Image: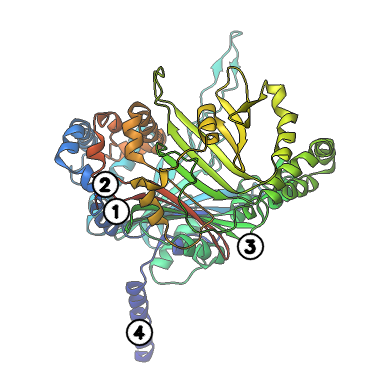
Amino acid sequence: MCRNALAALCSLMAALLARAADPVTIDRLVPKDSWLVVGVDDLDAVRERWDRTPALKWWNSERIQGLVKETLEESRQASRKRLQQLGVPEDSWSAPKSAGGALYAAHDDTLDSDQAHFLLHAEWGEHADGVAAIFDALLAEDERSRPGTTKAVEIRGRKAVRITMKPEEPKPEMGKDGRPRRPRPRRGGLFGEGGMFQHVEHVWYVRDGSRFLLGSRERELEEAIGVLEGQSSPSVHDDPDFRAAVEQVGRGDGWAVLLTGPMQRVAGMAGPQLTFLQPMMTTLFGEVKAYGFGLRSDQAPAQFELLQGIVVQGDRQGLLALPGPEVPVAPPPRFAAGDALGYGRIQVQFRDLMKVIDTAVASLPEEMAEGMEPVLQQYGPDLRKAFDALGPDVHVIGRLDRSQGVPDEAQQGVYAAACRDEQAMTGLLNLFLPEAGFEPRDFNGNTIFSAEGSDVSAGFGGGMFFMGSTPMVEQCLRGGEGGLGETAACRQAMAAVGSEPVIGWGYTDLVATLEASREAMIEMAARAERSAVPKSQRDMAEGVGLDLPDGLAQKLKDVDGKSLAEGFGPSQWDMRPLPNGLLTRFRLLRPASE
């Protein structure tokens, strides 16, 4: 007996040491059939890194806080009021230490189909009691308003609550003839008719010390608690595609992985409407196994960096094979004028595009392919000649119109692709553009297509094909003296990309863009602010005493470029091939003054 007790004690110690050395993250708690997994592994470390960035130092400066003080105070007052309504102390709410969640597929024997389910997890550490008080108050409030909604249960020896999600049946309505009419089903929301979780009747909430779990299936919650106890259980962490996606983007400040296999089980890909498209999707994109997203901060030379990875099986195929080949970073060409506020370059294998189109059409059902064949026979030869003549160099340039008579400075842009055969492209344009009113004309000895009343043109010159706003096309056809590569923003972006060859790269001078088009930039920021948190999520946050401030972008409309330059540098992106896919980085660089 002593020997068995000693063995049990040793096993327990080993489990505790393993947990101490390897913290349990969300990917070890959720099922192997998860198709979307999101995690923040260490929120305290994230906060420390963010506080070191120039952007957050700028935000916390006395001047900026003075501008948003009223809005932030209104939000804090609303949070306090809500916590008072719940009858809990005002300091009960705090940010978790770590958090994550997953959507996964589970087979429903009654419906005989795979359905979407979810599991959420968060750890609050020493603040767990305060947060638990809020959740308990919310459940009590819900029970008072809808008696019978909650029921006390146990999950693996822990006190838990089962919450009924199905809304009350609507009462019959009386028709004009005096007879009761069939009530309309209640729609809207994730759990309402038509929602992702309309099949979910109950949600379970359970607390395990400082950890909180919420899920739509009791079984997966039991398994997750077992993992927290040190037991082994299959999870999405075991999936090689998941691990490949995380390896591409890292865990950083936060991460997310979308797995295409389990997602198709619940996204209707096996349905009759979409099954016939699956071969074409494979032709267009190849065997895409997963998408990864990772956010990290305080990484020189970037303040914030969003990584987007694509995991493929085998070689990149279809449209994903078109980007390339890799080339070293080089200054923008001479036709890119120094007043441009944004520039990008990407390599595209246009010569392979027609092959992708032919293969995709061939993969369609016979009746659909037959409808496409006459179109390919008519336009295919001209398309093939044009695609063979283009690329792989493609340049994108953006600027703002500062000409006199323009009431609001408008965004202008042009695409420029290397063109080895002007006649091939001219033949293609002559097939389509005349019907839209475009006619060729001479411009400084070059050919340009334009239409009366249109601000878009296409033209040839210097071995390039240009398409975009007419003033920029004409400017590029003049040749220009370059100069964009000598600007501070462009030099900083090129240095950030580094010396390794890339498929594409680009940048935007954020501070100069705001100075040149303040109203448009403020409106864009305001739209992003409004859409960042959907109304349903905002309502949920307000329900637990976390009011999210709104309208901050408008409060910053008078901030000048000098102030912005203290906290922000250009935004920059680049794309690189990986042995198992593609990786794109979007970065906010540090201020040039650093």
- The residue under label 1 is 96
Q: Residues within 10 Å of mark 3 (few under 14, many from 20)?
A: some
Residue kind at label 3, given as amino acid type: Gln
Q: Looking at the image, is mark 3 or mark 2 earlier in the sequence?
A: 2
Q: Residues within 10 Å of mark 1 (few under 14, many from 20)?
A: many
Check if mark 1's residue and mark 3's residue have beta carbons within 8 Å.
no
Total label count? 4
Q: CA distance from mark 1 to mark 4?
A: 32 Å
**Quadrant position of the N terminus in the picture:** bottom left
Q: Could you tell whether 123 is left or right of 235 in the image?
A: left
Q: Image quarter for residue 520?
A: top left
Give 552 or 212, whichever is nearer the viewer.
552
Q: Looking at the image, is mark 1 or mark 4 earlier in the sequence?
A: 4
Q: Looking at the image, is mark 1 or mark 3 earlier in the sequence?
A: 1
Looking at the rendered image, the disc whose residue lies closer to the viewer, 1 or 3, is 3
Residue 313 disc label: 3
- The residue under label 2 is 55
- The residue under label 4 is 10
Q: CA distance from mark 2 to mark 4?
A: 50 Å
Answer yes or no: is residue 153 visible. no
